[in-house]
Amino acid sequence: MKNLHSTLKELFEWLHQHPELGFAEYETTAKLRTILEHEGIEVLDTGLQTGLIAQITGDLPGRCVVLRCDIDALPIQEQTELPYASTHPGRMHACGHDAHTAIMLGAALMLNQRRPELTGSVKIVFQPAEELPAGARVVLATGMLEDADLFLGVHVSPELPAGTLGLKAGPVMAAVDRFAITIHGRGAHAAQPHEGVDPIVVQAAIVQSAQTIVSRALDPFAAAVVSITHVESGSTWNVLPETAFLEGTVRTLEPAVREKAEVLMRGFTTQIAASYGAQADFAWRPGPPAVINDPALCQAARYVAEDMHIPTAQQENTMTGEDFSCYLENRPGLFVRVGTGCSFPLHHPKFKVDQQILYPTAQYFAQLTEHLLNKGV
């Protein structure tokens, strides 16, 4: 293979120019398959339409470490003016998945060169549809990761200096849950509200009361967010409608707080509606759980970073979510942040990644993987 620095740079720029949305990453999947197979890395027969799982098996039996990255883009019109900007209107790698993919492919290529020295095996997941979020569940459903002992993931961070690794044990990203509420009132003339049951009044009461779940019903030291993001009702100015609708999201870091938030949301909704003589249908749609980093893996990750003279920082908690957490429901894992330097925030049309982080971060994940296979935690 030619210079790996150049390979990763070229791949990153190609990915950035060809962003594809969740479950439509056909070009991306084909590109990755071509590179992997050219380098003699086995691509498993998963049945996935997009995304893939590659495998590198060492000469000695041992544990299985899984490296995971996400490959999908966002429906955003790019405004970076980069020479390798997106060629697909209305689509952009605004969350750094192009960098994640290049990093983990680079780690795979390095590990493949060290195959005789590896004890155990490495699987590399190029996951589709993280932004939906639905891809992790689809990948797990293939059954190809049943032998996994632990999972490693990466995400870029504009908050950290370029190349600095963000590490932290315990919860680092939130569980992502969605709720939808339909309020059934009774329509009437707007001039005669006493003859109906106004669902908009009930809707407003629920919107205001929902915030007291965080401020008054949960432990002040328990991180939680309740956001109502969509309200809808009525069709004209002089009629009380029959129904009103609202939906939003609840974010939590701890499983017990997550469970309690659902119970409280459901109770508040039904009780408030009943107090106005209305009825509320409450639907709770659980998403990915919180990302919780394993302490022993975090310690090993710090050790490897120090040995490689890579700067580290305490990873800050965030109430955004990541379906990497789905892999950690039955296995330990570690989600590492890597700084991109000063930049616009994630999901911004001017977001950029400093390409200088690609090769060193790939080196780091290759070294960390080898350490975990050969020496453990």
Image (tube, rainbow, N blue to C red):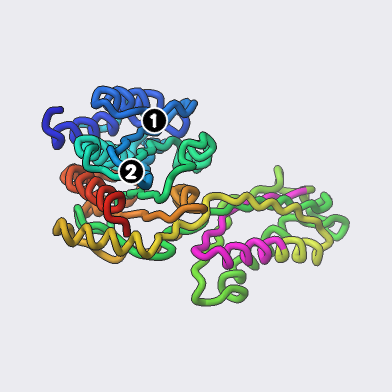
Indicate which disc residue 120 carries. 2
Q: On the picture, is 310 further left or further right than 198? A: left
Q: State the mark number for residue 268.
A: none
Q: Is residue 244 magenta?
A: yes
Query: Looking at the image, which is closer to me, 267 or 363?
Result: 363
Q: Which disc is residue 20 wearing? A: 1
* Magenta-drawn segment: 243-266
Residue 71 placed where, x, y %? 37, 36
Using the rendered image of the protein, determine whether residue 304 is visible from the camera's viewpoint: yes
Q: Residue at x 15, y 35 (%)?
A: 4
Q: Residues within 10 Å of mark 1 (few under 14, many from 20)?
A: many
Which comes sooner in the sequence, label 1 or label 2?
A: 1
Residue 336 x %, y %: 32, 54
**Towards the viewer: 58 or 162:** 58
Residue type for callout 2: Gly
Look at the numbered disc 2 and give the secondary structure of its residue: strand
* Residue lying at 60% horizontally and 51% vertically, measured from the top left: 286
Residues at marks 1 and 2 touching, judged by CB atoms closer than 8 Å: no
Between disc 1 and disc 2, the foreground one is 2
- Determine the CA span between mark 1 and mark 2: 33 Å
In the rendered structure, the answer to whether residue 169 lies left or right of residue 81 reads: right
Asked where in the image residue 13 lies, by quadrant, the reply is top left
Q: Position of residue 330 (x, y in %)?
A: 51, 52
Which quadrant of the view contains residue 200?
Answer: bottom right
- Which residue sits at x=36%, y=49%? 153
Q: Does residue 79 show up?
A: no
